[in-house]
Amino acid sequence: MINVAYAQDAAAAAAPANAGMHQLVMIGMIFVIFYFLLIRPQQKQQKALKKMIADAKRGDEIITTSGLHGRIVETKEEFVMVQVANNVTLKFDRSAIQSIKGYEADAKGGKGSKKAA
């Protein structure tokens, strides 16, 4: 009867080492899932936004991050001049551009293009 009790105790002592390995594998799997569901899509979105901002040119209708709608009348390396009304032109950093009307990025994150209206 005592031998049976010792046998059960030895099996219970071996289980935690195996359980620790399973926990590490689960944490690794959770990280992989987070990477593919959250981190990677966000990186693609940021890359597409940078490409769109770099492709902004004179005549494009834009929306800024503050919600202002206008048309680009002049571009420089770091900023754009945006006409919001007749005789009203504002200077914005390129990073303030949220979207360009009719701009559609390639699904592969490559070249962007103007969508046909």
Image (spheres, helix red, strand yellow):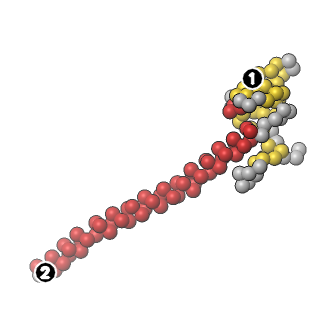
Q: Residues within 10 Å of mark 1 (few under 14, many from 20)?
A: few
Q: Is residue 110 above or below residue 16?
A: above
3D distance between C-alphas at marks 2 and 1:
85 Å
Along the line of sight, which residue is nearer the eye, 15 or 48? 48
* Residue drawn 76% across the image and 29% down it: 76
The amino acid marked with disc number 2 is Asn
Q: Is residue 89 above or below residue 64?
A: above
**Location of residue 59 in the rendering, given as x and y in whole percent from the top left corner:** 86, 33
**Location of residue 94 in the rendering, given as x and y in whole percent from the top left corner:** 71, 32
Q: Is residue 115 above or below residue 8?
A: above
The amino acid marked with disc number 1 is Lys
**Location of residue 84 in the rendering, given as x and y in whole percent from the top left corner:** 81, 24
Mark 2 = which residue?
Answer: 3
Q: Earlier in the sequence, mark 2 or mark 1?
A: 2
Q: Is residue 50 visible?
A: yes
| Quadrant of residue 95 within the rendered picture | top right
Q: Residues within 10 Å of mark 2 (few under 14, many from 20)?
A: few
For the residue labelled by badge 1, is the local secondary structure a helix, a strand or a loop? Answer: strand
Residue lying at the far left of the rendered structure: 2
* Residue drawn 74% across the image and 31% down it: 77
For the residue labelled by badge 2, is the local secondary structure a helix, a strand or a loop? Answer: helix
The label on residue 52 is: none
Residue lying at the far front of the rendered structure: 77
Q: Is residue 70 visible?
A: no
In front of the other: label 2 or label 1? 1
* Residue drawn 78% across the image and 47% down it: 112
For the C terminus, the image quarter is top right
| Quadrant of residue 4 within the rendered picture | bottom left
Mark 1 = which residue?
Answer: 91
| Quadrant of residue 23 within the rendered picture | bottom left
For the N terminus, the image quarter is bottom left
Describe residue 55's horizontal placement relative to residue 10 as left or right: right
